[in-house]
Amino acid sequence: MQTELTNIVGENNFILNPGSQDKRLIDHRGYFHGKASSIVFPQTTEQLSQLVMYCYENDLSLVPQGGNTGYGGGATPDQTGNQILVCLEKMNSIIEVDKVNFTMTVEAGVILATIQQAAEQSNMFFPLSLGAEGSCQIGGNISTNAGGLSVLKYGNTRDLVLGLEVVLPDGRVLNDLNKLRKNNTGYNLTQLFAGAEGSLGIITKAVLKTFPLPTQRCCLMLAFANIEQLYQFYSLSRQQSADCINSFEYISSASLSLVNHGPVDASFPLNNDYSHYALVEFSCSSNLFELEPVVEKILELAFEQQIIIDGVMAQSESQRKSMWRFREAIPETERLLGGSIKHDISLPISKISEFLNAIEIRLKQVTENFYTSVYGHIGDGNLHFNLLHSKESNATKFKQQFEQKLSTIIYELTKELGGSFSAEHGIGQLKLRQLQQYKDPMALMTMNAIKTAIDPKNTMNPGKLINN
């Protein structure tokens, strides 16, 4: 294989028989440890096409990997040691920034933060924002249909993609790189690969939507007596701000309590004795009106209607960043406490209260030896409902003994209320069982038919998303 890889990508662009401790062989959360016959770093679409063709002809499996920041093990090879890990980090060029069409054409290995910066330098805005944005790559973001902090206004990653270039499982290249908002010419092939987790091909280039750069922002930290009040403020904000709201993040009192004893070196701007909090951000790109007076009026109306019980508006960019730090520090704090049993679920917004009122009662029928950390993007119905071990127990033993039972209860109630067991983190190999259990059978059959038609040899990221 060494000769073939040298001929395809050059002698400095692959690693044969990588050691088991190579960070690329371990998923971001440390759940999955794989092996690989080689790790390859193609520099061009042509090189990748030749590599995939060679693998197809020799029945070798490929595992595409971006920044390796995913939560489902979708970019980790299996234990056979026969798979080739394909890292896109050297395909990292920004090809074009089009200020007229509000698009950006990039290679798959470009770091998300680099795309954000390039857009801002051209007085544009790319809204995808994640905790891992300093290391995740856009190809991986598209392949997992990443969510993030601005889905409420701008949508998931698939909503930000106009066109793709993809190397198919047999090595041929699908060129669907177009900038068109309207292109009514049959199946939307670009959307087929967004969220496919590398199971149908390897994304090499993308045309992304950009937007006018926000010139005004207003950030609020608010307190509520109950979840119903959050709904009311959410509706009021959308209606009265001309839909200028772009983030609506929920923080439970339990999650805030964790952070207050964790890594944030700042004082929380509100009394921390309330039950529910929301971090709400408004933004707009127009200078023809002032956003802050509009938001102040919304706050005034909310207080008059007794929708909120406390609140504060950031008075500077540093205060805004400090508010966001409390929200962003929750996962970090959970890790410091030994980790949690994580659940990335989505629900109709109107059902979140019903879920929260019922779930702990059901969980405590199994054990009372836990406490919750509940937070998330409540504006789009995405909750992170995590369970931590009590101080009297061991984190590892808690997960081993109770994870499957407790998670099943959470997913069953989520399904009852019309929700999803996977909101923004994808399936990978972590949630294959849940996919088979909760996905509509006809949807599964259709997914398998697509996989078989495009990848009949099952060489493209086998064992991920599609369990065949």
Image (spheres, rainbow, N blue to C red):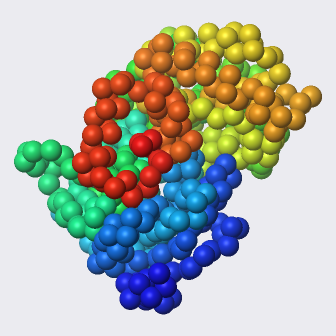
Pick the front one: 138 or 322: 138
- Residue at the location (75% across, 26% down)? 402
Determine whether 417 is above or below 294 in the image.
above
Instruction: State the residue at coordinates (23%, 67%).
Output: 173
Closest to the observer, 29 or 35 = 35
Q: In screen coordinates, is 145 left or right of 192? A: right
Return the residue found at the far right.
Answer: 392
Name the residue furthest front.
58
Q: Quadrant of residue 33?
A: bottom right
Q: Is residue 229 above or below residue 217?
A: above
Q: Residue at x 63, y 25 (%)?
A: 407
Foreground pick, 212 / 103: 103
Query: Does residue 216 appear to the left or right of 100 in the view shown?
Result: right
Quadrant in which residue 7 is drawn: bottom left
Image coordinates for residue 147, horizontal then vertical, percent: 45, 43
x%, y% of residue 17? 60, 76
Q: Percent x, y for residue 350?
A: 45, 15
Name the quadrant of the C terminus: top left
Q: Position of residue 148 (x, y in %)?
A: 48, 44
The image shows residue 299, relative to residue 416, as above or below, that is: below
- Kindly indicate the quadrant of the structure image that contains residue 108: bottom left
Please give the name of the residue rendered at 50% of the width and 64% of the height, measured from the top-left corner: 83
In the image, 382 versus 61, the foreground residue is 61
User: Is residue 330 toward the left or the right of residue 281 in the image?
Assistant: right
306 horizontally vs 207: left or right: right
